[in-house]
Amino acid sequence: MLLSRDEISMAVKRLASEIERDYAGKSLLVIGVLRGSVIFLADLVRNLNILVEMDFIGLSSYNTGTESSGEIKVKHGIASRLKGRDVLVVEDIVDTGLTTSFLIDY
């Protein structure tokens, strides 16, 4: 085991405190990249004491295999209005950065 449940909980609370400080007085849109971010995103949002709206996006580059095809596909789009908003993206695994780069452009 790399980190205990308590260590993870403390890290999530610390991160939530930093987000609260950075976005105090603002309305924050948190976008979770499905499906891997859901559990962490739920824990994070439960620890935030600021106004938060959540939305999700489903992206895929793996098709049916275990290696990235290099082509990102949107499987489920974002329903929320993004223009002029403070947006925090929660992603589970960043390896090549391809998906993250695609999402920023999207």
Image: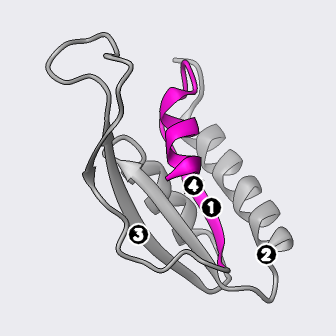
Please state the horizontal and vertical placement of residue 103, each as a whole percent of the image.
51, 47
Give, as a three-letter code, the residue at label 1.
Leu
Amino acid type shown at disc 4: Val
Residue 71 rendering spot, x and y as whole percentages: 35, 26
Residue corresponding to mark 3:
55
Pick the residue in front: 43 or 30. 30
Say whether residue 34 is visible.
yes
Instruction: Name the spot of residue 106 as percent of width and height, x first.
Output: 49, 53
Q: Are marks 4 and 3 in contact (CB under 8 Å)?
A: no
Q: Nearer the viewer, residue 106 or 96?
A: 106
Residue beneath the point at 54% across and 20% down: 95
Check disc 1 and report the residue beneath it.
88
Dot 1 or dot 3: first in sequence order is 3
Tag 4–tag 1 contact (CB < 8 Å):
yes
Disc 3: CA contacts within 10 A as few (<14), some (14-19) or many (>=20): some
The residue where tag 4 is placed is: 89
The alpha-carbon separation of the residues under discs 4 and 3 comes to: 10 Å
Image position of 87 (left or right of 74): right
Mark 2 vs mark 4: which is more N-terminal? 2
Q: Would you place residue 24 above or below residue 98 in this image?
A: below
Q: Residue at x 64, y 73 (%)?
A: 48
Residue 17 image-quadrant placement: bottom right
Mark 2 highlights which residue? 23
What is the CA distance from the residue labelled 2 to the residue labelled 4?
14 Å
* Secondary structure state at the residue bearing disc 1: strand
| Residue neighbourhood size for the residue with mark 2, other residues' Cα within 10 Å, grouped as few (<14), some (14–19), many (≥20) | some
Mark 4: secondary structure: strand
Amino acid at dot 2 = Tyr
Q: Range of the magenta residues?
A: 85-106
